[in-house]
Image (cartoon, rainbow, N blue to C red):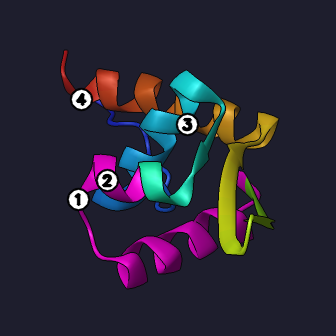
């Protein structure tokens, strides 16, 4: 039996959690991701950087009032990579 290769970018608990959330909502604020995933700010920032480097998400920085606002949005490339990852992991479960 052949096992399909798993995308190393998505084969991380936090990055996979981020992508799982973004697939459902397309775009989310940093605070929402942080609360949903229950990791540290530093770890989430680092993992978002990895997803951005891969072209899987876009990160937009702005302000809401006087407070910084970071929003993450899944890209078409990221959505496709996530779908491929799900198909690959499904192959392991058969």
- For disc 2, the marked residue is 35
Q: Residues within 10 Å of mark 1 (few under 14, many from 20)?
A: few
In the image as oriented, which residue stretches furthest toward the left? 93
Residue 92 circle label: 4
Tell me, yes or no, whether the highlighted magenta stretch contains residue 46.
yes
- For disc 3, the marked residue is 22
Give the structural element (helix, strand or loop) at label 3. helix
In the image as oriented, which residue stretches furthest toward the front? 65
Give the mark, 2 or 4, whose residue is nearer the N terminus: 2
Q: Residue, x 52% and y 23% (percent of image)?
A: 24
Q: CA distance from mark 4 to mark 1?
A: 27 Å
| Of marks 1 and 3, the one in the foreground | 1
- For disc 1, the marked residue is 38
Q: CA distance from mark 3 to mark 4?
A: 24 Å
In the image as oriented, which residue stretches furthest toward the bottom? 42
Q: CA distance from mark 2 to mark 1?
A: 5 Å
Give the residues in magenta. 33-57
Q: Position of residue 58 (x, y in %)?
A: 77, 56
Asked whether the beta carbons under mark 3 and mark 2 sit within 8 Å of each other, the answer is no
Q: Position of residue 39 (x, y in %)?
A: 26, 67
In the image, is residue 2 above or below residue 18? above
Pick whichever, 40 or 65, lies toward us. Answer: 65
């Amino acid at each position: 039996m052949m096992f399909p290769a798993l995308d190393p970018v998505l084969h991380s608990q936090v990055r996979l959690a981020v992508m799982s959330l973004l697939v459902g909502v397309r775009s989310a604020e940093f605070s929402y991701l942080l609360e949903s995933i229950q990791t540290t700010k530093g770890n989430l920032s680092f993992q978002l950087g990895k997803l951005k480097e891969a072209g899987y998400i876009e990160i937009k920085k702005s302000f809401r009032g006087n407070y910084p606002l970071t929003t993450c949005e899944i890209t078409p490339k990221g959505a496709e990579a996530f779908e491929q990852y799900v198909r690959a992991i499904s192959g392991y479960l058969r």
